Image (tube, helix red, strand yellow):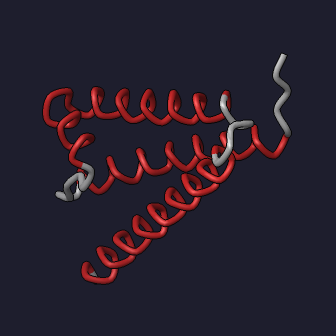
Amino acid sequence: MDRYRTSEVWLVVVILLMSGIDLWTTLLHLEDGGSEANPMMAWALEFGGEPGFAIAKVVATGLGAFALLLHVRFSGVRFALQVLAGIYALVLVWHAWVTLDRFLTMT
């Protein structure tokens, strides 16, 4: 049986949490007239509406993070999880920037 380090499990949990925040803030930006930058997610939004978009995002991120966790002992996979967490952190910084910009241009 594979045993995962607590840090590995927490890394996946943090990725999933950041993905959820990304989903929520993306939906807020879409309500304000923004658009989806990721072509695959834009397609999901176009053909599935907000529910299809949300399902696609949760399933893609969840399955991807889980698959990486299952293979965390392979060379480079732990690093890939760390990079993914870093990318999500940058995406959340971008969301914060866009939100701040919209707030400042409204006043």
Q: Nearer the viewer, residue 102 or 70?
A: 70
Left or right position of 15 against 41: right
Q: Residue furthest left?
A: 46
Q: x and y percent of residue 6 in the render?
A: 85, 40
In terms of image quadrants, where is residue 102? Answer: bottom left
Residue at horizontal 51 percent and vertical 33 percent from the top: 64
Q: Nearer the viewer, residue 38 or 105?
A: 38
How many marks on residues?
0
Left or right position of 78 against 102: right
**Quadrant containing the C terminus in the rendered view:** bottom left
Q: x and y percent of residue 74 in the render?
A: 69, 37
36 lies above or below 50 = below
Q: Nearer the viewer, residue 100 or 57?
A: 57
Residue at horizontal 33 percent and vertical 52 percent from the top: 28
In terms of image quadrants, where is residue 57? Answer: top left
Residue at horizontal 22 percent and vertical 58 percent from the top: 32
Left or right position of 50 against 69: left
Residue at horizontal 82 percent and vertical 32 percent from the top: 4
Q: x and y percent of residue 91 in the render?
A: 44, 61
